[in-house]
């Protein structure tokens, strides 16, 4: 082979391997940055960054049965009110799992996050790539309950829902 052909082949191989590696790592990095950024924005009461993490019609599911907040109305209003005094909430991710669609434009995640005040939670949801940027389309938060205390927590929860139903 001629030297020019070898150089061209080497460059082609290098850039094709680089593109493969980038397509394999970059979406994971971007989604992790999005989710970490969401938690940082919440802890800093940064309204713009927090809401910008979601799609225009994104949904956040809280831990209570009535907590289903949608953009642009109920989620924006709730977060605006909570951040108004300059105070948000802090959850620190302990672990996160990502699964990507075949075309790598959709990902599903689950994460364990911790609040010093409230304990462990699981966040789970869907992120989508829109115009080259990852956004949260759906985020659901649940309170983690160790199996050893599940029965006690279940009783408390059942009692609270029964009482709530009586008062409504």
Image (cartoon, rainbow, N blue to C red):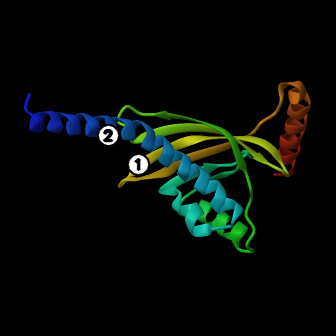
Q: Position of residue 24 (x, y in %)?
A: 41, 36
Taking the spot 35% from the left edge, 55% from the top edge, the residue there is 131
Q: Which mark is residue 19?
A: 2
> Is any part of residue 82 visible from this angle?
yes
The image shows residue 99 at horizontal and vertical percentages of 50, 33
Residue at image coords 44%, 39%: 25
Give the vertical position of 14 relative to 81 (above or below): above
- Secondary structure at numbered mark 2: helix
Q: Are marks 1 and 2 in contact (CB under 8 Å)?
A: no
Q: Which residue reaches farthest front?
A: 3
Q: Position of residue 3 (x, y in %)?
A: 11, 35
Work out whether mark 1 precedes mark 2 in sequence or the reverse, and give the earlier one: 2
Can you name the residue that lies furthest to the bottom here? Answer: 85
Viewer-nearest residue: 75 or 110: 110
20 relative position to 135: left or right? left
Mark 1 or 2, closer to the camera: 2
28 or 134, which lies in front? 28
Q: Residue at x 72, y 67 (%)?
A: 82
Pointer 1 residue: 129
Structural crowding at the residue carrying mark 2, measured as other residues with C-alpha within 10 Å and reported as few (<14), some (14–19) or many (≥20): few
Q: Is residue 115 left or right of residue 36?
A: right
Tell whether 34 sits left or right of 14. Answer: right
Task: Residue at the far left: name it.
Answer: 2
Q: Position of residue 7 (x, y in %)?
A: 17, 38
């Amino acid at each position: 082979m001629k030297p020019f052909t070898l150089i061209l082949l080497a460059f082609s191989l290098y850039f094709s391997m680089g593109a493969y590696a980038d397509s394999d790592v970059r979406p994971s990095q971007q989604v992790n940055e999005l989710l970490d950024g969401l938690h940082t924005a919440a802890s800093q009461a940064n309204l713009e960054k927090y809401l910008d993490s979601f799609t225009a019609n994104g949904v956040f599911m809280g831990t209570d049965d009535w907590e289903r907040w949608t953009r642009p109305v109920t989620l924006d209003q709730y977060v605006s009110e909570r951040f108004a005094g300059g105070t948000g909430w802090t959850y620190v991710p302990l672990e996160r799992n990502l699964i990507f669609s075949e075309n790598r434009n959709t990902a599903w995640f689950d994460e364990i996050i911790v609040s010093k005040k409230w304990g462990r939670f699981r966040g789970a949801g869907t992120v989508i790539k829109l115009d080259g940027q990852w956004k949260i389309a759906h985020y659901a938060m649940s309170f983690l309950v160790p199996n050893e205390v599940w029965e006690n927590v279940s009783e408390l929860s059942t009692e609270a829902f029964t009482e709530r139903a009586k008062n409504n």
